[in-house]
């Protein structure tokens, strides 16, 4: 009872459709100037979806082309992380002195968020541009910063897993290598 009158309410299952319709209609009518209507959104995104491999300009390309460029940067960054991280992991796994010297630094840098590395990469590689024959930038500051960020973030698991793997090699295997007088390179490639 509210103010002496009987009020009946009905409850319905709220599945979110009402909110979506309200937002859609509000944006279509134009009550929200910052929210485009679904028609405007589709019109703007249609060329990227319908023609996913089209290249209309340097920054006006299809969605699959942008996805390919991103995956290429991820692969290159991971390759850099492997090239740098694997030898460091071997050194951490084989040398107690190296572990005592550098493990604290690694443990401090390892939990740093990838978002924190990106600005550092942008500052480090500011102004870097590699142009093609036509003078267009083919590799710039943002690409270098992305590679740096991906490499740094992928390096820590590589370093730590390599070090743990090297430490997990049974001592008997290393003793056999000494008995057989294997060189360091053969021990590295055959045993470790």
Image: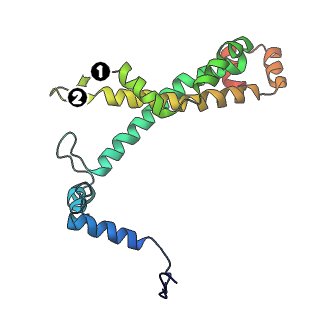
Q: Earlier in the sequence, mark 1 or mark 2?
A: 1
Q: Which label sits in the foreground, 1 or 2?
A: 1
Residue 76, how many percent across, how many down?
A: 43, 32
148, above or below 39, in the image: above
Secondary structure beneath dot 2 equals: strand
Q: Secondary structure at mark 1?
A: loop
Q: Is residue 79 left or right of residue 42?
A: right
Q: Quadrant of residue 41?
A: bottom left
The residue at 35%/21% (across/down) is 125
Q: Quadrant of the C terminus?
A: top right
In the displayed image of the protein, which residue is found farthest to the front?
4
Q: Residue visible at 27% across and 54% down?
A: 52
The answer for how far apart the CA atoms under marks 1 and 2 are is: 10 Å
When the figure is inspected, residue 116 is found, relative to residue 13, above or below; the finding is above
Observer-nearest of 161 and 1: 1
Q: Position of residue 93 (x, y in %)?
A: 71, 21
Circle 1 is placed at which residue position?
Answer: 128
Q: Is residue 188 visible?
A: yes
Instruction: Judge whether residue 183 can be spotted in this image.
Output: no
Tag 2 residue = 137
Residue 111 x/y as whole percent: 59, 30
Task: Identify which residue is drawn at 44% across, 36% down.
Answer: 75
Q: Nearer the viewer, residue 182 or 125?
A: 125
Quadrant location of residue 106?
top right
Q: Is residue 31 left or right of residue 145?
A: left
Q: Mark 1: few, some, or many residues within 10 Å (few <14, many ≥20)?
A: some
Image quadrant in which you'd find residue 102: top right
Left or right: 113, with 23 as reference point? right
Residue 110 pos. (x, y %): 59, 28
Placement of 153 over or under 171, stated as above or below: below
């Amino acid at each position: 009872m509210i103010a002496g009158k009987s009020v009946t309410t009905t409850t319905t299952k709220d599945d979110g459709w009402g909110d979506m319709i309200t937002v859609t209609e509000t944006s279509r009518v134009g009550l929200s100037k910052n929210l485009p209507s679904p028609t405007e959104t589709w019109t703007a995104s249609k060329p990227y979806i319908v023609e996913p491999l089209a290249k209309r300009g340097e920054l006006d390309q299809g969605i699959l082309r942008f996805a390919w460029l991103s995956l290429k940067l991820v692969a290159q960054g991971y390759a850099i992380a492997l090239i740098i991280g694997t030898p460091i992991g071997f050194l951490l796994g084989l040398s107690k002195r190296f572990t005592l010297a550098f493990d604290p630094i690694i443990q401090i840098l390892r939990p740093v968020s990838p978002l924190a590395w990106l600005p550092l990469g942008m500052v480090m590689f500011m102004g870097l541009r590699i142009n093609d024959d036509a003078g267009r930038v083919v590799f710039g500051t943002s690409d270098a910063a992305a590679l740096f960020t991906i490499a740094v973030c992928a390096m820590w698991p590589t370093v730590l897993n390599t070090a743990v793997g090297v430490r997990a090699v049974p001592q008997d295997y290393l003793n056999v290598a000494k008995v057989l007088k294997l060189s360091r390179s053969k021990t590295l490639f055959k045993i470790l």
